[in-house]
């Protein structure tokens, strides 16, 4: 089935962007996230080049954004909620990151090009946004409902783990990316030990009597 037959008769720019994103990623291994890659993707999808450019007003940065969103969507399709619900949190996060590795395995050069583009100083805020979005998507799929500071700390930590794992992945020549998966397992183990420590510390702080709080209540009853 051609990409043109997947698009509706009168597609929106959002639909065009979503359809072109994986095609652009295929071409980006050779051309980077450039007008040439966009034109090639548009030709293969039977989309007019001028219309394709309208779908990516930010140029290469928008192309990377759309591709990473496509990876997010494919990751979610790979893990229905009922499958994840039967797993421990640690295993859910591991499975989601490893799924991203599998999805990107055939496009490592494109990923290298994408990360080089995002590393430009002018793209730093956008790079941070995309990293946060990936971490947030994984935590939400894993069932996280935290709304306090843990919401932010979990995503910041996972974003760092994911970023460092991708750096290893880009240069991993081991079979089945075994070295990357081992690195990921070690990093997640470190994170889980830290989270366990935080939980124990919070539990002790709740249970332990506070002299300052007691004296404060004597001075200011009802507070």
Image: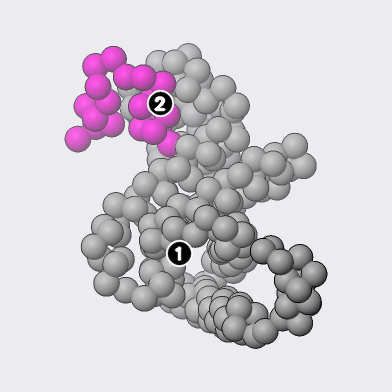
Q: Position of residue 207 (x, y in %)?
A: 59, 83
Is disc 2 placed on a helix, strand or loop?
helix
Q: Is residue 24 above or below residue 194?
A: above
How would you rate the neighbour count of disc 2 (Cα within 10 Å): few for under 14, some for 14-19, many for 20 or more? few
Q: Is residue 87 above or below residue 153?
A: below
Residue 11: within the magenta?
Answer: yes
The residue where tag 2 is placed is: 14
The one nearer the camera, 168 or 205, is 205
Which residue is at 32% across, 19% downward? 11
Q: Position of residue 184 (x, y in %)?
A: 52, 74
Q: Which label belongs to residue 97?
A: 1
Residue 31 visible from this viewpoint: no
Residue 80: within the magenta?
Answer: no
What is the residue that sits farthest to the left in this orientation? 1
Residue 55 visible from this viewpoint: yes
Which residue is at 39% across, 62% downward? 142
Q: Which residues are magenta?
A: 1-21
């Amino acid at each position: 089935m051609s990409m043109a037959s997947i698009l509706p008769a009168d597609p929106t720019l959002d639909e065009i962007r979503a359809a072109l994103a994986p095609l652009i990623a295929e071409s980006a291994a050779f051309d980077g996230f450039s007008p040439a890659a966009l034109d090639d993707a548009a030709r293969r999808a039977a989309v007019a080049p001028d219309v394709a450019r309208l779908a990516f007003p930010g140029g290469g940065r928008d192309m990377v954004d759309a591709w990473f969103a496509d990876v997010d969507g494919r990751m979610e399709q790979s893990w229905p909620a009922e499958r994840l619900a039967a797993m421990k949190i640690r295993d859910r996060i591991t499975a989601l990151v490893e799924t991203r590795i599998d999805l990107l395995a055939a496009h490592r050069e494109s990923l290298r090009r994408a990360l080089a583009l995002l590393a430009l100083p002018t793209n730093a805020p956008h790079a941070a946004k995309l990293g946060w979005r990936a971490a947030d998507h994984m935590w939400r799929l894993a069932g996280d409902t935290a709304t306090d500071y843990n919401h932010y700390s979990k995503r910041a930590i996972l974003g760092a783990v994911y970023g460092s794992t991708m750096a290893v992945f880009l240069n991993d020549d081991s079979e089945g990316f075994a070295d990357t998966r081992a690195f990921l397992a070690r990093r997640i183990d470190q994170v889980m030990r830290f989270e366990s420590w935080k939980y124990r510390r919070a539990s002790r702080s709740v249970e332990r009597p506070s002299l300052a709080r007691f004296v404060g209540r004597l001075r200011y009853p009802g507070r």
